[in-house]
Amino acid sequence: MRRSKPQPIRNKLDLGDRVQVRLIKKRLGLSETELTAIVGRIGNSISAISKEATAQRASIIPQPPQIPPAAVIATVAGSDQAASDIITTEQAP
């Protein structure tokens, strides 16, 4: 007698299945510890895990790039000079 292989439930994450865990980690950009923490807190529903991962990413505020003040001053001074050149060429008939 032949037995069919049991089909996994598509919307539930099985932490025992290494392939499924690897794919979910890659798709959501999570580490192993982050994924297990979310599953422990939320449950094993893939849609709930995806929503929680998105909410975690949205709550992290990215830091603005560190620009040295001299570079900012040089950029502003360069744009002011370019603006004054445009004004003088427009006024000169």
Image: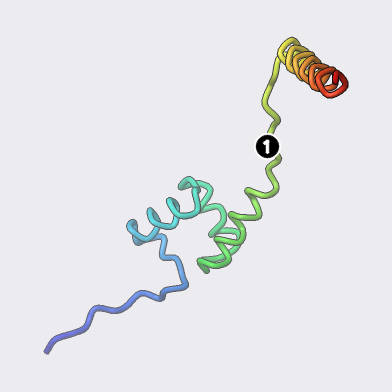
Q: How many numbered circles are shown? A: 1
Left/right placement of residue 5 relative to residue 34 reads left
Residue 33: x percent and y percent? 50, 46
Left/right placement of residue 56 relative to residue 75 reads left
Which residue lies most toward the right here? 91
Residue 32: x percent and y percent? 46, 47
Residue 5: x percent and y percent? 24, 78
- Location of residue 48 (image quadrant): bottom right
The answer to whether residue 86 is above or below residue 43 is above
Q: Residues within 10 Å of mark 1 (few under 14, many from 20)?
A: few
- Location of residue 41 (image quadrant): bottom right
Which of the pair 67/44 is nearer the observer?
Answer: 67
Element at badge 1?
loop
Q: Residue at x 46, y 70 (%)?
A: 12
Q: Residue at x 37, y 61 (%)?
A: 20
Which residue lies most toward the top here? 70
Picture quarter with the N terminus: bottom left
Q: Residue at x 42, y 74 (%)?
A: 10
Picture quarter with the C terminus: top right
Residue marked by disc 1: 62
Which of the pair 5/65 is nearer the observer?
Answer: 65
Residue 60: x percent and y percent? 68, 43
